[in-house]
Amino acid sequence: MKVIICGAGQVGWQIARHLSGERNDVTVVDVNPDLVRRATDTLDVQGIIGHASYPSVLDRAGARDADMIIAATHSDEVNMVTCQVAHSVFAINRKIARLRAQSYLDVIYSDLYRSDHLPIDVVISPEREVAEAALQRLAAPAAFDTESFFAGQGQLLGIHIDEDCPVINTPLRQLTDLFSTLRAIVVGIRRKGHLFVPNAGDQIFADDQAYIFTDRADVNRTLEIFGKTQTKQDRVVIIGGGNVGLGVAKVLEARTDRVRVKVIERNRATAEQAADALERTIVLNGDGLDSVVLEEAGISSADAVLVVTDDDKTNLLAAVRAKELGCKMTICLVNDPSLVPLMGPLAIDAYINPRATTVSSILRHIRQGRVRGVYSIGDAEAELIEAQVLGTSPMAGSRIRDINFPEGVLIGGVLKDGKVIKPTGSTRIEEGDVVAIFSMAADVPEVEQLLQVSIDFF
């Protein structure tokens, strides 16, 4: 597949990294020569320096025979015009654009992106993706990472294994014997910084990070078995009242269980806008690092604090301050992946990486086959892929034990006739089933072959 990626920033580079590693023909376009050079020096891609929306630049990038264009520059308007040029001048079949401004995302203007208007096939909103990730973290406070699959019926949980975990030093095959009705499978383990797919004889040790795929109905039981207690989040403080914080607050105050939310926003104009948009949520104009402001927000009795300002260091420090003042759980937004190792020493419970959430969303629309969801794990080390099995797939009609999976691939769950099934070696995968596959990054191309269908995007 020939793909043009416009924008060589963090998201563009990460998408290029995924696709070039899967033997696609990738060209990266950016007006910044340093970013283009970084991409061509570190990845197997071609680079073009220039404005992505210029027809001449896209022509040099090979737009005349490209299969897809991904517009992920820092400008919404450039991304929109790039897709228009790609459609009108070069007839590129698939066009994906990253758009940030909320005005472009309002449902009442959705007709704007029709093929006879502004032809964008897929619109990705980083702020909405991050807000959704934040809500998922709040829904599973005992997990450091979480993502929903199977239309909410399946859940991936990232759990840090503590010394008092009841199942440490237990071979995974024994977990099946001990908890025969538990619909949960350990699909990945990170140990001393190394992520791998375990086999039945592997054990879980203290300080491991385990990725577990489970039926939604078994989430609480899964957490208990792995030594975690799930608590309800009745009081939440959000530091940062921009698009992400406001989006989360709107969802929380609309819930029937009446979560009490308070928002702290440093910028007065932004705080006033948030206050106008919210009905029951209290908005405080102040610094989220200020202990007095945090106390006024009731941080000592809060079940969770969500820190989503546009500055990573502020987010880290505010989360630490909130924990110091008695907040039970801290979640913060971190753009810079080099800061992630600080989460443990700083006792921050969970983090959200906007780049990873945006990359996951874009990958969902790139993968070949009937792919319904993709979640990027860690620093693009692995993926959890949800896909429907087609009749053309080598998996269709085969038992799992007979499918030639690479060593770094494991099926975490199967959705059959609307019910989540815990897969075993004897489980037969049928056409129409939906599977959740955990795959190390290097093995994703082989997974796509197993999901086989010629270039076909859904």
Image (spheres, rainbow, N blue to C red):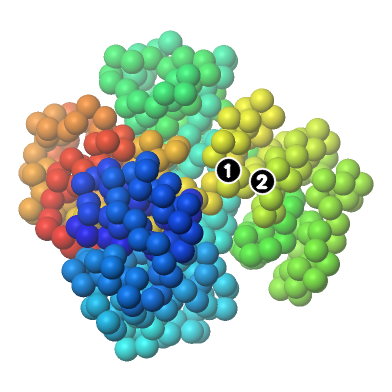
Amino acid at circle 2: Asp
* Residue found at the very far bottom of the displayed protein: 116
| 43 relative position to 265: left or right | left
Amino acid at circle 1: Asp
| 267 relative position to 89: left or right | right
Q: Do the residues bearing badges 1 and 2 touch, measured as CB atoms within 8 Å?
A: yes
Q: Quadrant of residue 455?
A: bottom left
* Circle 1 SS class: loop
Looking at the image, is 424 positioned above or below residue 154? above
Q: Quadrant of residue 56?
A: bottom left
| 231 relative position to 188: left or right | right
Q: Position of residue 282 (x, y in %)?
A: 80, 62
**Residue at the image point whose x is 27% and y is 60% from the top:** 3
**Residue at the image point whose x is 43% and y is 76% from the top:** 80
Q: CA distance from mark 1 to mark 2?
A: 7 Å
Q: Position of residue 407 (x, y in %)?
A: 22, 27
User: Of the residues under marks 1 and 2, which one precedes in the sequence?
Assistant: 2
Pointer 1 residue: 336
Residue 225 seen in the figure: no
* Circle 2 SS class: helix
Looking at the image, is 311 positioned above or below residue 192? below
